[in-house]
Image (cartoon, rainbow, N blue to C red):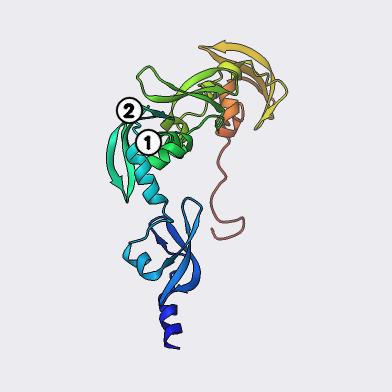
Amino acid sequence: MIMDYFKTRLDLTGQKFGRLTVLEPAENVGRDTAWRCRCECGSEAVVKTGNLRSGNVRSCGCLRDDYIRGKRLDLTGQVFGRLTALERAEGMNGHTAWRCRCGCGNETVVRTGSLLSGSAKSCGCQEHARRNDLTGRTFGRLTVLEPVKNKYGQASWRCRCGCGNETVVRTWDLTSGHVASCGCLKDAAFGKSEGADEDLTGRVFGKLTVLGPAGTVKGNSMWRCRCECGKETVVRGSGLRTGNTRSCGCLRGRPRKRQGPPDGAGGG
């Protein structure tokens, strides 16, 4: 009963010791309790509780093999992905390691096993680049094509706009929503570019029905319109699109509704 209580208190299932992860209790080794463990290399081993907790055993035996192999192997100058091994470094938790230079210029210390297995191929810059890759994403009218540097050397992206034009935009301008087109959205608001070519004939804006184009004034497209009050007027296309112009002026000139008591109420 006492032993069952003691074992329950010392349940190591799921805990990790070096390369070993405890799976379940195993049969005692002599008078010592033991645990079945899985090593990072994939092998399984039965290890006594005392050896796990003291750190005397941290692998199925592969740790010693790696150390011996690492001592024998000279990786200096060898390339692993974007990493070039420069020199042997201090061990990492019992693992042999190498100081490496990444293709991005950074230096990092990597375990021998990670280099040989191919699990480490950069200082982490590739993973960072993948997390921050905007290629294929759409921001407003802009679809990102590829990363580039702008004329100031800033990280930017070449984008194709919905109007067909291509432009280079900084990362922050895209992600913040500060830039959402090649400039055609702004031009359209002022009756330029694609907005100037848009035929508004027959469309209704407020009280105005567009009769036809009336030329341009200082680069702004103008349209002849008939108001519901019967008058005709010429207005800018941008005023129609933004809703700033909704009549010939009669809406603005309409007298305000009289404020006061209803008929027959109050007064003399």
Please give the name of the residue rendered at 39% of the width and 45% of the height, measured from the top-left corner.
Answer: 66
Q: Is residue 122 visible?
A: yes
Residue farthest right in this picture = 202
User: Where is 32 relative to 210, above or below?
Assistant: below
Location of the N terminus (image quadrant): bottom left
Mark 2 highlights which residue?
Answer: 105
102 sits left or right of 249 in the view: left
Front-lying residue, 244 or 174: 174
Relative placement, left or right, of 109 versus 255 is: left
In the image, is residue 23 above or below residue 114? Answer: below
- The residue at which mark 1 appears reads as 123
Task: Name the residue rendered at 57%, 11% in the picture.
Answer: 216
Give the number of the disc on residue 179.
none
Of all residues, the one furthest to the bottom in this rendering is 1
Callout 1 amino acid: Cys
Q: Residue at x 37, y 24 (%)?
A: 154
Q: For the residue labelled by badge 2, is the local secondary structure a helix, a strand or a loop?
A: loop
Frontmost residue, 97 versus 240: 97
Q: Earlier in the sequence, mark 1 or mark 2?
A: 2
**Which quadrant holds the C terminus?**
bottom right
Q: Amino acid at mark 2?
A: Gly
Relative placement, left or right, of 208 versus 63 is right
Residue 60 picture quarter: bottom left
Mark 1, other Cα within 10 Å: few <14 / some 14–19 / many ≥20: many
Q: Position of residue 71 (x, y in %)?
A: 32, 40
Q: Position of residue 144 (x, y in %)?
A: 53, 27
Other residues around mark 2 within 10 Å, as few (<14) / some (14–19) / many (≥20): few
Q: Position of residue 213 (x, y in %)?
A: 66, 14
Q: How many angstroms separate mark 1 from mark 2 (CA)?
A: 9 Å
Total numbered labels: 2
Identify the image quadrant of residue 189.
top right
